[in-house]
Amino acid sequence: MGRGISMATRKELIQALGGRYCQGTRSEKARILDEFVAVTGYHRKHAIRALRTWQRDEGGTRPPRKRIYDEAVREALIVMWEAADRICGKRLKAVLPELLAAMERHGHVRLDSAVRTKLLAMSAASIDRVLAPIREKAKGRRKRRRVMNSAVKRQVPIRTFADWGNPVPGFFESDFVVHCGGVSAGSCVHTLVVTDIASGWTECLPLVVREQSMVVQALEILRTRLPVDILGLDFDNDGAFMNQTVLDYCRSRRIELTRSRAYKKNDQAWIEQKNGSVVRRLVGYERYVGFEDSRTLARLFEVARLYVNFFQPSFKLRSKHREGAKVKKQYDAPTTPCERLLRDPRVGDAVKQALRDQRDRIDPVLLLRDLRHAQAELAAAVKNRGENNANTSVGEFEQFLAQLPGLWREGEVRPTHRKPPPAARTWRTRVDPFESVWPEVISWLQTEPDATAKVLFQRLMRRYPDEFAPGQLRTLQRRVRDWRREMARQLVYANLSATTPEHLATSMVE
């Protein structure tokens, strides 16, 4: 389709056909355009733009297009748009005849016949085009995304998820978890999270405020806790990471610094997964502020780092491939981060021996008890309770150990995730259909205790035709069930009140 034509020949065709195209009628333009597309192989829209360049090359100007919708039509359209509650052009086009007739009928507008004809003849696309500047001004200025320092941006290369491969232990992804409770106003605690790509080893450190100098101090603290040296750090485009302070720190420590693409969270899939499975699972989504909450979070993470890295196995993606519309993923067997470091031949023997010694000294149940204790303190801080109340909810170690087999019966055991019990419902949302006949139903039940609700309902329908619907059987069954439970409870309590403590003691001994 014309791919053999040189660029010089195409330019000559544009010079030869451009004048005829720009000055021709609509039918002539269509014929010239068809021939030009057939010869050059251009897309039709690109061919139109190419032929129009003849005017710029020749110094000519495009003749002004005759204006169809004048200012009067524009003002009338704005009135109709406002009266229709600022709907889109397609919806406004559909309702415009009825809306205009209704407004004229009630004396709200009075349009000239020519203006009215043009207004009703406008297409939906023309309506949107005319109203585009009006909508933009009504909505206000568009928010622009904040652009980080371009000088720092140019110095930090981008690394995506696919670029990691199989790095040696020591390359970490890092991110912030904001404990704002859904309210972004004011200052709140931020947790700096780092995770090793090779092993999944995760460390967390709370910061009272998010600031670049505190990020550097937190990284220095994490270097003393991590079992391997930090060889590389991958951040997102947060201003607390992308600044000269952090850049100089990484260069002085010979740490390779990379960043993800803006607004592409999949580039940091490793750390995003840990943000949910570790931090949010332990802490929840409440708001934490100030030094006290930060200290409590620090105590929690000090325990959690041992519990998560030594006793919490995790999956690791081994490979994935696409088959048609499906992506099949294969994972390694779930393994703890500690075990991955012990199995990795690239980790030194001294580091492995230190990990084995530390693992042998750790009591997982004691860690879990301390973890629940720290979570109870956080929950108490949110609910404005004292520390003493938080301590009593966890109990001593022996008591905690004895409660482990039955904790599942209590539901949610993490104090940071417990929700207040819902208020008991004591009101009705519908009229009780059996209110007028309930005394009669009770008399039947007292006479025939074994009668089923279905039998009673059929009896009611025969006695009161056209008053009950078949779908109300379930309501009567619930009412009968509740009545029988109440009768049984009264019977039990009546027997207990009639029984003396001596009789109870005698029966227990027997």
Image (spheres, rainbow, N blue to C red):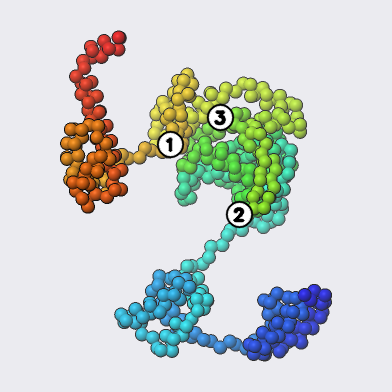
Residue located at (21% from left, 46% from top): 462
Between 306 and 108, the one lying in front of the other is 108
How far apart are labels 3 and 1 at the CA level?
A: 20 Å
Establish if 173 lies above or below 336.
below
Q: Is residue 476 above or below residue 105?
A: above
Image quarter of the N terminus:
bottom right
Which element carries disc 2, helix, strand or loop?
A: loop
> Spatial distance from mark 2 to mark 3, Cα to Cα?
33 Å
Mark-to-mark CA distance, 2 and 1: 32 Å
Answer with mark 2 or mark 1, whichever residue precedes in sequence. Answer: 2
Q: Which residue is mark 3?
A: 303
Callout 2–callout 3 Cβ contact below 8 Å? no
> In this rendering, is residue 422 above or below 367?
below
SS label for mark 3: helix
Check disc 2: other Cα within 10 Å, few if <14, some if 14-19, many if 20+: few
Q: Amino acid at mark 1?
A: Arg
* Residue 86 image point, x, y percent: 43, 71
> Which residue is denoted by mark 2 in the rendering?
263
On the picture, is 69 further left or further right than 461? right
For image coordinates 70% across by 82% down, the residue present is 34
Residue 230 visible to an observer of this rendering: no
Q: Which amino acid type corresponds to the residue marked 3 in the rendered image?
A: Val
User: In this picture, is 136 found above or below 53?
Assistant: above
Mark 2: amino acid:
Tyr
Label 1, secondary structure: give it.
loop
Residue 461 visible in rendering: yes
Residue 190 appears at what percent x and percent y? Answer: 54, 43
Nearest-to-viewer mark from 3 and 1: 1
Q: Nearer the viewer, residue 56 or 92?
A: 92
- Residue marked by disc 1: 418
The quadrant the C terminus occupies is: top left
